[in-house]
Image: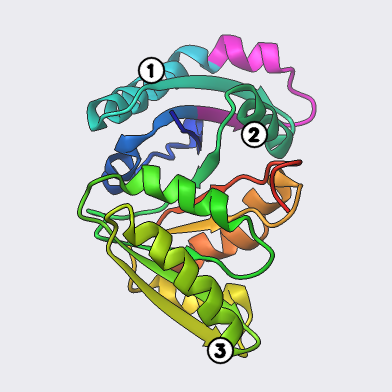
Amino acid sequence: MTRVLVPVAVLEGESVSPGLVDLLGTVDVTVLGYHVLPEQTPPDQARLQYEDRATDALEDLSDAFRTAGGAADHRLVFTHDRQQSIDRIADEVDAKALAVPGITGDVERVLVSLSGDVAVDRILSFLTELVGDRDIGVTLLFAADTEDAAAERLDTAAEQLRSSGIDVTTTSVVGTGPSAALIEEASSHDAIVMSERAPSFSSLIFGEESDRIAAASVGPVLVVRYEEGLDT
């Protein structure tokens, strides 16, 4: 089954909203509790001091995901490099997507960006498994230079999702950048699905596009990972 990595700053009290837990009930989840250490602090020392408290919090989160329906486990890292640790664990657990947690209630509609040079088939495959047979609507968004270019991609993708029984609408935006278009539409949706656009998974997850979009939308963002050799 598809697995999603959910990183949380566990010792800073970061958690996962009930809406995101329910949304991920159709997939398996690995909760990654991380704590970024000062350069002079050895990870082993921090583990001795904080491991029990962090593990208790991670077990509670894993139980919540299991109750929602999927398999769930957790990892704990004390690190000097958050991005590197997330990359490493994502590879180890073969995560197909990563969640940037955000606040949301019941998820009734998901916004999906197909803008740019993204692996549309991987996004749609992930989305089909994520939505399953639940009553969750999908809005496909494409920011393009021309209406014709947007219509071709959106129509093909929408037809593929409808064949799986998913309620789909499409929105095209001409003359606006992909990030701006996504942020503009985000407020009327409960969660966002987007693709990693470059091989550098970590550079996207923290500090760049998905973080800006998560901050602007408040709700969670699910980033479908790039896979070298499969994505073009």
Q: Secondary structure at mark 1?
A: helix
User: What amino acid is found at the position of numbered circle 3 in the picture?
Assistant: Glu
Q: Position of residue 5 (x, y in %)?
A: 51, 34
| Mark 2 residue crowding within 10 angstroms, few (<14) / some (14–19) / many (20+) | many
Report the residue marked by disc 2: 86
Report the residue marked by disc 3: 147
Q: Are marks 2 and 1 in contact (CB under 8 Å)?
A: no
Estimate the spatial distance between the alpha carbons at disc 3 and disc 1, rounded to whole Å.
51 Å
Estimate the spatial distance between the alpha carbons at disc 3 and disc 2, rounded to whole Å.
38 Å
Q: Residue at x 38, y 42 (%)?
A: 129
Up/down of 109 relative to 31, above or below: below
Q: Residue at x 52, y 14 (%)?
A: 51
Q: Position of residue 222 (x, y in %)?
A: 48, 50
N-terminal label among 2 and 1: 1
Report the residue marked by disc 1: 56
Q: Judge left or right: residue 50 versus residue 145.
A: left
Query: Nearer the observer, disc 2 or disc 1?
Result: 2
N-terminal label among 3 and 1: 1
Q: Position of residue 154 (x, y in %)?
A: 49, 73
**Span highlighted in magenta in the image:** 32-49
Up/down of 9 relative to 106, above or below: above
User: What amino acid is found at the position of numbered circle 2 in the picture?
Assistant: Ile
